[in-house]
Image: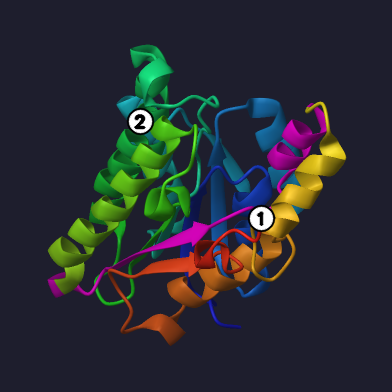
Amino acid sequence: MRLSTYKAFITGGSEGIGFAIAAKFLAEGAQVVIAAHQQTILDASARALGCQGLLMDLKDLASVENAIAQAAKIMGGLDIVVNNAALTSPSKPVETTSLYELEAILDTNLRGSFWVMRCAKPHLQSGRGAVLNISSMAGVTGQRDHAAYAMSKGGLNALTLAAAADWGPERIRVNALCPAGVATPALKRWAAEQPDPAGIDDYLKRIHALGYCAEPEEIANAALFLCSPEASFVTGHIMHVSGGSEIGYKA
């Protein structure tokens, strides 16, 4: 097992990509603590995974500090931190995005990830510590009518590079994954609420060169590699796990 003896803390671990990463890491022998901000979903997911779950609000620094300290105490340290928790922005371009909407996205997706990394740093072991930020292709290519979200993920990519440079001498690796469309429960709920769910499904297939929308487990496979000893010389890398969406739209 590739992560035996490793200790992982995963934000947004109660569903979707975070849940899939937690399940993958557990299957590979890691100890895992997940964090989320909704107690009921967190408890159910922790039971399903067979791991510890901690309530955490990314917008509250004290909550972040407390959750990470608890996770390190429960597991006896940290080797891996996965920043997965995020909000999506409303479908608005720059000129109609309000300050409130912008700050809500940045507080979770960018500032929250920054504080998780800062608070986790003292617990990460030199030589085997790894941070993985779950970013988005929106932060690489931009995304129409999602200015705030694209801004937050572009910032997260820049933070990844800066932290990789800062922490490289301690051999703590920092990387990011950029998915495109992923068939998470949140995406499925959103699609079902649209006037033309079948049209949404067709669109999600067309924007990927591979012709389909990824499953969370496919993103988890890439996360496993970047956090495992197999990627020991990989840091400051923004990995596209995008099904070829950046190649260009088919329609």
Q: What residue type is labelled 2?
A: Leu
- Left or right side of 185 for 136: left
Q: Please name the residue that numbered disc 2 is placed on.
A: 106
Tell me: 242 left or right of 27.
Answer: left
Q: Quadrant of residue 15?
A: top right
Q: Nearer the viewer, residue 166 or 207?
A: 207
Q: Residue shown at 28%/57% (left/top)? A: 160
Image coordinates of residue 114 in percent, x first then y, are: 29, 42
Residue 217 or residue 249, whichever sits in front: 249
Rendering coords of residue 9 (x, y %):
47, 53
- Residue extending farthest right: 198
The numbered mark at residue 47 is none
Tell me the residue at 47%/63% (across/down).
7
The residue segment tinted magenta is 169-193
Which residue bears the numbered disc 1?
251
Look at the picture and state if 223 lies above or below 133: below
Residue shown at 26% from the left, 69% from the top = 172
Upstream in the sequence, badge 1 or badge 2? 2
| Crowdedness near tag 2: few (<14), some (14–19) or many (≥20) residues, C-alpha within 10 Å | many
What separation in Å lies between label 1 and label 2 (alpha carbons)? 31 Å
Where is the N terminus found, in terms of image quarters? bottom right
Q: Which of marks 1 and 2 is in front?
A: 1
Give percent across and percent down for residue 190: 73, 32
The C terminus, quarter of image: bottom right
Q: Which residue lies furthest to the front in this view?
A: 251
Task: Decide if residue 81 is on the left or right side of residue 205.
Answer: left
- Does residue 146 show up magenta in the picture? no
